[in-house]
């Protein structure tokens, strides 16, 4: 894919100096503007009406400006003074471009948010416009900088303690950030914060620290994973016993666990499943029926561990029934059949009400009054005090869901690395060739499909107790679409990507309630933008990047010992 | 080792293979010749289980295999390097080769990898390169190497010389001779009749789905009908 270039390398070389100066002016403006008032009304965002007293959001803008300033100054004054070996450690210009883009997005969001919250652009005071102008200057100026090709910091070997400390700081930072973001009620501030975090992450990656982090932490992978889980476990302790954020967090986790299961089907095996939510629903209904709720038609109430297994098995049997006839034929049929299955499932659940069929699900009213879980005497419905902190109901489920997610991740990672995972790769690449190689194509597809259904069923069982009631209308096509979007936007086939994608997709509607009517519109726009600019998702596996950017020489050069002139895939090889 | 009896294969209502029978003995190189559309590829695909026959029997090593799924047939030691190479272009050379070993359950893939690298040193040199960046000849080597990774007792090659330069073609043919010397049984489909028959112990000539005639490689090479149709001589 070739994009038309306005700024050519030639122009960069000629006007790089001017660009630097313009960007510097922009950076200074960005640092100064937060001290000016940005809005006429104090209801907008977090009160940005003061002269000389920036609000927290304004400080974020200042931070972006300061980061840009550092990049620009370092590129001009620090690099020439360094010994040659260290000059290419950081990619300052690349970083400057990234942070300037981020700052522009940030200031634009602020202006739009102020206008929306106060009713019109007239409510943006001069400081806001100045900041936006500064961002524009910085953006334009940094376009003219000659970007460094690579940052070599990733090849520098750092002592272990430093890496561990960095891991700890990053994890703690994320914990505080998540806690802070969840407490934010103002939608404008929330989005601005998201944009800021995005800009900061991209800056860190581009400037060279990302390469350092991933190469150094490779040695400490278990530490990193443990730290991430520790942070996740610590989250409820930051909430002062409040259920408000915890209920959002548990919803995110249920959604993420389900998306990870779907990621096995879609991301690893390459099967398009448009009715995945039905498997979650199947698990939820089974658990509800076996929960001992007064509204359940079945009197049997086995221990939860048994219920979970039955839920998973029922879901995977449904998967086998749907999958075995359709997985033999080409992929398009699977999409159609699963789409229909999702709808049929919902209708069947509505009709199993004793009028049209046997009474099993109570029809569209569903099964309410599902009792809280009680595992080994631990009552999930009651608050508990752990380490002097009160842990409310939703936090109990939160811990259980974390364990569930951990389980799904372990399954996912092991499958991915296993023989089966290699078979899936072959199927994704070229099904016919895979078959000729002795890959049991049908068997592996069916395994992915039914296995994914099993995980969804298990998640559904937990969800039933968490939600207290299970109704058919919770399991509609739109939910399947959102799950699929979480997988695709986050990065098919990756764990971290799908976790991020699921979190964003579930958190945003929760935090942007005023936006509800436009939710689908925004969702569609997001999809279009992502598909245009980053089809491989937020976080891409190396292999996916190759799939989507086959003819980027830059990328081919990264993927290994490509000899000169061999950067392109021959048409022959592409069949 | 391989015996095909009265095989009939069709695509929908189109008969592609009409009651053909042939046999490949242990250690032999047998060549299957035929004009475009004669049904050679269809025959190979059916033997390796990628296509179900309408009727007829296929026996491999004393076992009937015509109803077995493809992966079971590979597991029994019959490998197939398909027409048009069909390497996995986005995967690296090593990944391609290791996928060739997918069907096997033993731990000997490492030794076979070494053997393939020995046969084709270029594959070793470029082992971490995406296979799609390879030239046609290199891709063919990879395709053959990949088929060898299952440590087959019999190998079916579908037009291994397709699109190769004469030099590259010679290399591939000498590799096939090497494999034969190692005791691998080979069923070779080729457009290049002279090269294929020079190697073959026996040859079958397919014409629109039926076997027109067959003979030893040397006899076929001097056969008038073969010389006219496949070697372009008058
Ligand atoms: N998938 C298919 N669907 C329908 N017809 C097919 C299909 N594949 C092959 N055929 C038909 O079957 C006949 C035999 O094809 P086949 O590919 O076996 O020929 P071939 O001998 O390998 O030819 P070539 O030398 O060109 O590779 C042809 O008439 C072809 O058009
Ligand atoms: Mg053919």
Image: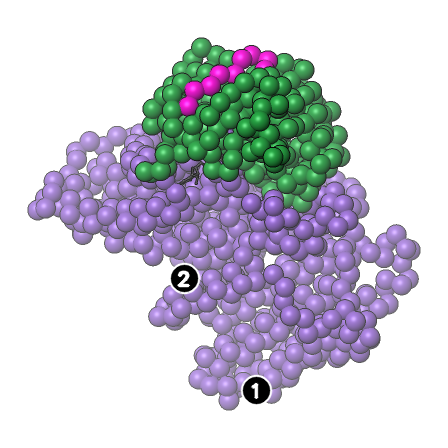
Chain colours: A purple, B green
Few, some or many residues within 10 Å of mark 2 (<14, 14–19, 20+): some
Side of A159 relative to A505 (left or right)? right
Determine the residue positioned at 64% across, 21% down: B199
Residue assigned mark 1 = A125
Chain ID at mark 2: A
Determine the residue positioned at 89% across, 63% down: A80
Does dot 2 land on a helix, a strand or a loop? helix
Whether labels 1 and 2 belong to a single chain: the reply is yes
Q: Can you give x and y, in whole percent of width and height, for residue B154 in the image? A: 55, 19
Does dot 1 land on a helix, a strand or a loop? loop
Q: Decide if residue A80 is in sight here.
A: yes
Residue assigned mark 2 = A510
A125 vs A4, nearest the viewer: A4
Determine the residue positioned at 28% across, 46% down: A341
A54 vs A250, nearest the viewer: A250
Q: Which quadrant: the C terminus of chain A?
A: top right
Side of A139 relative to B208 (left or right)? right
Q: Residue furthest bottom?
A: A122
Q: Earlier in the sequence, mark 1 or mark 2?
A: 1
Above or below: residue A19 compared with residue B9: below
Q: Can you give x and y, in whole percent of width and height, for residue B213 in the image? A: 49, 22
Above or below: residue A371 compared with residue B200: below
- Residue segment shown in magenta: B20-29
Q: Residue furthest top?
A: B62
Chain ID at mark 1: A
Q: Decide if residue B157 is in sight here.
A: no
């Amino acid at each position: 894919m070739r994009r038309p270039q306005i700024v050519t390398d030639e122009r960069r070389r000629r006007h790089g100096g001017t660009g630097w100066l313009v960007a510097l002016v922009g950076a200074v403006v960005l640092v100064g503007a937060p001290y000016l008032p940005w809005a006429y009304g104090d209801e907008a965002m977090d009160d940005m009406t003061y002269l000389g007293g920036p609000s927290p959001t304004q400080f974020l803008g200042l931070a972006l400006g300061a980061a840009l300033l550092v990049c620009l100054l370092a590129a001009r004054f620090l690099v020439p003074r360094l010994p040659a070996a260290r000059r290419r450690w950081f990619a300052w210009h690349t970083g400057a471009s990234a942070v300037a883009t981020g700052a522009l997005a940030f200031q634009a969001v602020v202006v739009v948010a102020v206008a929306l919250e106060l009713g019109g652009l007239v409510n943006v005071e001069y400081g806001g416009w100045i900041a936006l102008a500064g961002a524009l200057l910085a953006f334009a100026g940094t376009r003219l900088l000659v970007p460094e090709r690579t940052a070599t910091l990733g090849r520098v070997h750092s002592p272990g303690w430093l890496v561990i400390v960095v891991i700890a700081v990053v994890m703690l930072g994320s914990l505080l950030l998540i806690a802070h973001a969840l407490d934010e009620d103002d939608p404008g501030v929330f989005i601005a914060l998201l944009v800021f975090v995005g800009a900061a992450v991209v800056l860190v990656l581009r400037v060279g620290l990302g390469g350092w982090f991933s190469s150094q932490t490779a040695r400490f992978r278990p530490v990193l994973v443990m730290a991430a889980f520790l942070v996740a476990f610590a989250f409820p302790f930051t909430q002062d016993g409040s259920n408000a954020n915890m209920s959002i967090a548990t919803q995110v986790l249920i959604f993420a666990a389900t998306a990870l299961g779907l990621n096995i089907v879609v991301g690893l095996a390459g099967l398009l499943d448009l009715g995945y939510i039905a498997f979650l629903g199947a698990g939820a209904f089974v658990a509800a029926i076996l929960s001992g709720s007064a509204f359940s038609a079945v009197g049997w109430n086995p221990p939860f561990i048994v219920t979970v297994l039955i839920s998973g098995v029922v879901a995977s049997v449904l998967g086998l029934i749907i999958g075995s006839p359709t997985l033999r034929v080409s992929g398009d049929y699977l999409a159609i059949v699963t789409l229909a299955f999702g709808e049929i499932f919902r209708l069947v659940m509505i009709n199993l009400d004793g009028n049209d069929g046997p009474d099993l699900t109570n029809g569209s009213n569903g099964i309410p009054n599902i009792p809280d879980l009680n595992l080994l005497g631990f009552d999930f419905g009651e608050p508990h005090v752990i380490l002097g902190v009160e842990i409310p109901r939703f936090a109990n489920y939160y811990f259980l869901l974390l364990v569930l997610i951990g389980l799904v991740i372990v399954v996912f990672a092991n499958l991915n690395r296993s023989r089966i995972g290699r078979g899936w790769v072959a199927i994704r690449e070229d099904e016919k060739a895979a078959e000729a190689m002795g890959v049991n194509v049908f068997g592996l597809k069916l395994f992915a499909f039914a296995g994914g259904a099993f995980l969804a069923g298990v998640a559904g069982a937990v969800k039933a107790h968490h939600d207290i009631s299970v109704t058919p209308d919770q399991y509609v096509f739109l939910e399947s679409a959102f799950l699929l979007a979480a997988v695709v936007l986050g990065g098919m086939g990756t764990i971290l990507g799908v976790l991020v994608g699921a979190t964003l997709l579930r958190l945003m509607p929760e935090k942007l309630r005023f936006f509800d009517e436009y939710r689908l519109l925004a969702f569609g726009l997001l999809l279009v933008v992502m598909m245009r600019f980053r089809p491989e998702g937020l976080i891409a596996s190396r292999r996916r990047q190759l799939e989507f950017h086959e003819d980027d020489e830059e990328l081919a050069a990264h993927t290994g010992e490509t000899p000169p002139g061999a950067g392109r895939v021959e048409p022959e090889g592409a069949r | 080792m391989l015996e095909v009896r009265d095989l009939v294969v069709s695509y929908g209502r189109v008969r592609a293979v009409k009651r053909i029978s042939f046999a490949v003995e242990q250690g032999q190189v047998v060549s299957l010749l035929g004009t475009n559309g004669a049904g050679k590829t269809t025959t190979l695909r059916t033997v390796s289980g990628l296509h179900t026959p309408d009727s007829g029997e296929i026996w491999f090593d004393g076992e009937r295999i015509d109803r077995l799924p493809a992966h079971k047939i590979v597991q029994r030691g019959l490998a197939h390097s398909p027409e048009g190479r069909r390497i996995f272009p986005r995967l690296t050379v090593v990944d391609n080769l290791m996928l060739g070993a997918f069907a096997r359950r033993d731990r000997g893939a490492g030794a076979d990898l070494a053997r393939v690298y020995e046969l084709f040193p270029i594959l070793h040199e470029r082992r971490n390169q995406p296979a799609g960046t390879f030239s046609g000849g290199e891709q063919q080597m990879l395709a053959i190497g990949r088929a060898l990774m299952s440590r087959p007792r019999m190998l079916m090659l579908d037009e291994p010389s397709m699109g190769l330069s004469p030099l590259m073609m010679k290399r591939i043919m000498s590799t096939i001779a090497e494999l034969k010397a190692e005791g691998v049984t080979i069923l070779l489909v080729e457009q290049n009749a002279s090269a294929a028959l020079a190697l073959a112990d026996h040859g079958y000539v397919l014409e629109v789905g039926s076997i027109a005639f067959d003979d030893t490689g040397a006899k076929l090479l001097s056969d008038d009908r073969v010389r006219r149709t496949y070697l372009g001589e008058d």
